[in-house]
C-alpha cells in the first residue's frame, strides 16, 4: 500500500513503536534459535544444556546479547515498508511466473464474491436471510478486493489496494497523493488511532517474516536431530497465526484511513488556504484537480482564502 506510515520524530526511533515492531519480534526469533543452539543443535537436544548455558551468562554477555539484537532490529527498521510491500506482492520481475498464478487465483475469488453479492432482478421477493448473505458478500468484496485490473497476488496486497481505492474516493480524492498532506492536519485522537493501527500492522508483518525465517533456520539446524525436527512447527505455526493477524490488522488500518478522510478532508482544504466547497459536486471537482496537481504536476487555477478566523483553519 502506498499510503505508508507517516514520518516520526527521531526521538521515537527507540520508543514504543520500535519495541513493538522492531525489537520484540527480533528478540523472540533470536531467543528461539539460541535455545536450539544451546540445547545441542544440530544433534540431539537437551534443554537442560540451554538452561545451564543461560544461567552461566554473566552480566556483560547478557548486555552484549541484548545490544546485538537491538542493533539487528535497528538496522532492519528502515526496511519495514519494503517488508510490507513484499507481502503485498510487489515482487521483482523475475518472480512474475509465481505472481501470475496467484493473481489469477485471487481474481477467481473476486469473481465468486461478486456473483455471491449480485442482487436478483426482483429484490422484493428475496427472503431477508438471503439478503443478509448478499450484503455480507458485498461487504467482503468491498473490503478485500480492489477493481479486477488492480488485483494483487496476495491477500494482504488486495486488502490494502482495496482500502487505498476506497479512502476519499466518494469525494474525489486520490488517497495515495493526498494522504501525506492529510496526515499532518488530523486531530490528535484520529492520528493516535491511525498510528496505533499502523503499528499493529507493521508488528504483525514483522512477526510473520521473522517466524518464517526462524522456521527455515530451525529446519536447517534440526535436519539431523530426529523427531526434534518437528520443533520447526513452532515458528511455522506462529507465522500462520501472524499471517491471519496481518489481514485483520490491514482491514483495521484501512478503515482508520478511510475515516480520516471522511472527518478531516475539509481541514486539508482549509489548511491549503483554499475556499471550502459548497457541496459534494464542487468538492469532487476540487479534489480531482488537487490530486492531479500532486500526482502529475498539473497546474490548476487557484484562488486563496485568507480568513484566519475560520473554524477550519489550522494553527
Image (spheres, helix red, strand yellow):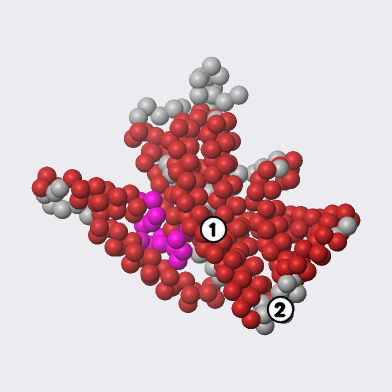
Give me the residue at 64% from left, 51% from top: 21
The numbered disc on residue 44 is 2
Q: Secondary structure at mark 2?
A: loop
Mark 2 packing: few (<14 Cα in 10 Å), some, or many (20+)? some
Residue where numbered disc 1 is placed:
242
Give me the residue at 64% from left, 67% from top: 214
Q: Secondary structure at mark 1?
A: helix
Give me the residue at 65% from left, 56% from top: 25
Which residue extends farthest top? 309
Q: Which residues are magenta?
A: 142-156
Distance from label 2 to label 1 (Cα)? 29 Å
Quadrant containing the C terminus in the rendered view? top right
Using the image, determine if residue 276 lies above or below residue 39: above
Give the x, y percent position of residue 292. 47, 46
Using the image, determine if residue 268 lies above or below residue 109: above
Looking at the image, residue 82 sits to the left or right of residue 261; the answer is right
- Name the residue nearer the viewer: 166 or 176: 166
Amino acid at each position: 500500500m502506498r499510503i505508508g506510515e507517516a514520518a516520526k520524530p527521531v526521538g521515537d526511533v527507540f520508543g514504543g513503536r520500535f519495541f513493538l515492531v522492531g525489537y520484540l519480534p527480533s528478540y523472540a526469533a533470536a531467543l528461539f534459535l539460541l535455545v536450539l543452539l544451546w540445547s545441542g543443535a544440530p544433534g540431539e537436544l537437551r534443554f537442560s544444556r540451554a538452561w545451564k548455558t543461560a544461567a552461566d551468562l554473566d552480566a556483560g554477555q547478557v548486555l552484549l546479547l541484548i545490544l546485538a539484537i537491538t542493533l539487528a532490529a535497528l538496522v532492519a527498521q528502515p526496511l519495514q515498508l519494503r517488508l510490507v510491500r513484499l507481502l503485498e506482492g510487489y515482487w521483482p520481475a523475475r518472480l512474475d511466473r509465481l505472481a501470475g498464478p496467484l493473481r489469477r487465483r485471487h481474481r477467481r475469488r473476486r469473481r465468486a464474491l461478486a456473483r455471491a453479492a449480485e442482487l436478483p432482478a426482483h429484490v422484493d421477493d428475496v427472503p431477508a436471510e438471503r439478503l443478509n448473505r448478499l450484503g455480507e458478500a458485498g461487504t467482503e468484496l468491498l473490503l478485500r478486493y480492489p477493481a479486477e485490473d488492480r488485483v494483487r497476488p496476495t491477500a494482504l496486497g488486495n486488502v490494502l489496494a482495496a482500502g487505498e481505492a476506497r479512502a476519499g474516493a466518494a469525494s474525489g480524492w486520490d488517497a495515495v497523493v493526498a494522504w501525506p498532506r492529510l496526515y499532518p492536519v488530523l486531530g490528535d485522537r484520529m492520528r493516535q488511532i491511525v498510528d496505533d493501527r499502523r503499528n499493529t500492522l507493521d508488528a504483525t508483518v514483522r512477526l510473520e517474516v521473522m517466524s518464517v525465517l526462524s522456521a527455515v533456520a530451525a529446519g536447517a539446524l534440526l535436519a539431523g536431530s530426529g523427531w526434534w525436527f518437528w520443533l520447526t512447527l513452532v515458528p511455522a505455526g506462529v507465522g500462520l497465526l501472524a499471517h491471519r493477524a496481518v489481514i485483520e490488522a490491514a482491514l483495521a488500518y484501512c478503515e482508520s484511513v478511510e475515516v480520516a478522510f471522511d472527518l478531516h478532508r475539509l481541514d486539508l482544504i482549509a489548511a491549503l488556504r483554499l475556499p471550502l466547497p459548497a457541496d459534494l459536486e464542487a468538492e469532487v471537482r476540487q479534489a480531482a484537480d488537487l490530486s492531479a496537481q500532486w500526482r502529475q504536476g498539473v497546474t490548476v487555477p487557484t484562488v486563496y482564502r485568507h480568513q484566519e478566523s475560520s473554524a477550519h483553519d489550522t494553527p
